Image (spheres, rainbow, N blue to C red):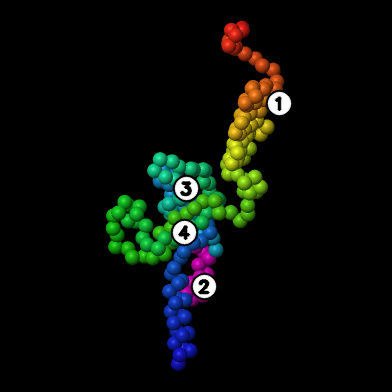
């Protein structure tokens, strides 16, 4: 009798959790930067109560999470095919989206109450490898890269770069360069001046 009761309780719990969704990896279908929402497609399949497995439907008007405050924001392009993590909120999102307007919905953990975080991919990337190797924050957009270290900043595009440290600032471009530091200014390459060069002793054309 007790075993049958326990089994029945397990069946009830198992049936209930089929309607609960929490967090699912997914893919961006499209993104609207004006509304800040996306259409997303969860990966995998839904297990139905009868044992059948069905494809997840696309979810529309899903708020996309970027690092953001009242007076700052960090944003980057979100494109169809990008990976994301879909987080299913416990309660109805409509009161939040409408700035407090209450609804009659009592849905919990429903797919329509999702938000998503872009940037979930199946493998790492070169920026992550460099960030770990150099203990730095790395911003990378194809051939353009900014590396923020504890002792300085390096911004580069192909062979050109700007480097700023505690005691000097350097600029390099196409085999030429200039370095400004405590010991003076050093220039590598031809110097062409259009205007006046001044010094404490006077001026030279």
Which mark is nearer the camera, 4 or 1? 1
Q: Which residue is mark 4?
A: 87
63 or 66, which is in the foreground? 66
Stretch of the chain drawn in magenta: 45-56
Q: CA distance from mark 2 to mark 4?
A: 24 Å
Q: Residues within 10 Å of mark 4 (few under 14, many from 20)?
A: many
Picture disc at residue 175? 1
Which mark is nearer the camera, 2 or 1? 1
- Asked if one can make out residue 112 in the rendered structure from this viewpoint, the answer is no
Residue at disc 1, secondary structure: loop
Q: Earlier in the sequence, mark 4 or mark 3?
A: 3
Q: Earlier in the sequence, mark 4 or mark 1?
A: 4
Residue 50: in magenta span = yes
Q: Earlier in the sequence, mark 2 or mark 4?
A: 2
Is 194 rendered above or below residue 14?
above
Q: CA distance from mark 2 to mark 3?
A: 36 Å
Which mark is nearer the camera, 2 or 3? 3
Is 169 rendered above or below residue 102?
above
Q: Which residue is mark 3?
A: 66
The x and y percentages for residue 72 are 43, 41
71 or 169, which is in the foreground? 169
Picture disc at residue 52? 2
The x and y percentages for residue 41 are 50, 57
Residue 125: in magenta span = no
User: Which residue is found at the position 59% from the left and 12% from the top?
Assistant: 199
Screen quadrant of the C terminus: top right
The x and y percentages for residue 187 are 67, 21
Q: CA distance from mark 4 to mark 3?
A: 14 Å
């Amino acid at each position: 009798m007790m075993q049958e009761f326990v089994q029945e309780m397990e069946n009830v719990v198992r049936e209930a959790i089929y309607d609960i969704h929490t967090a699912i990896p997914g893919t961006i279908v499209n993104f609207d930067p004006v509304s800040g929402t996306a259409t997303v497609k969860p990966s995998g399949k839904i297990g139905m109560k009868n044992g059948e497995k069905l494809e997840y439907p696309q979810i529309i008007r899903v708020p996309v999470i970027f690092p953001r405050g009242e007076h700052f924001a960090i944003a980057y392009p979100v494109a169809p095919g990008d990976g994301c993590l879909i987080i299913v909120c416990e309660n109805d999102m409509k009161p939040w989206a409408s700035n407090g307007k209450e609804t009659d919905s009592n849905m919990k953990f429903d797919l329509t109450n999702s938000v998503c975080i872009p940037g979930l991919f199946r493998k790492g990337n070169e920026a992550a490898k460099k960030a770990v190797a150099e203990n730095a924050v790395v911003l990378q957009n194809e051939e353009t890269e900014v590396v923020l270290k504890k002792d300085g900043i390096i911004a580069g595009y192909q062979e050109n770069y700007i480097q700023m440290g505690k005691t000097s600032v350097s600029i390099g471009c196409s085999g030429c360069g200039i370095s400004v530091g405590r010991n003076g200014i050093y220039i590598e390459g031809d110097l062409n001046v259009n205007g006046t060069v001044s010094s404490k002793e006077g001026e030279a054309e």
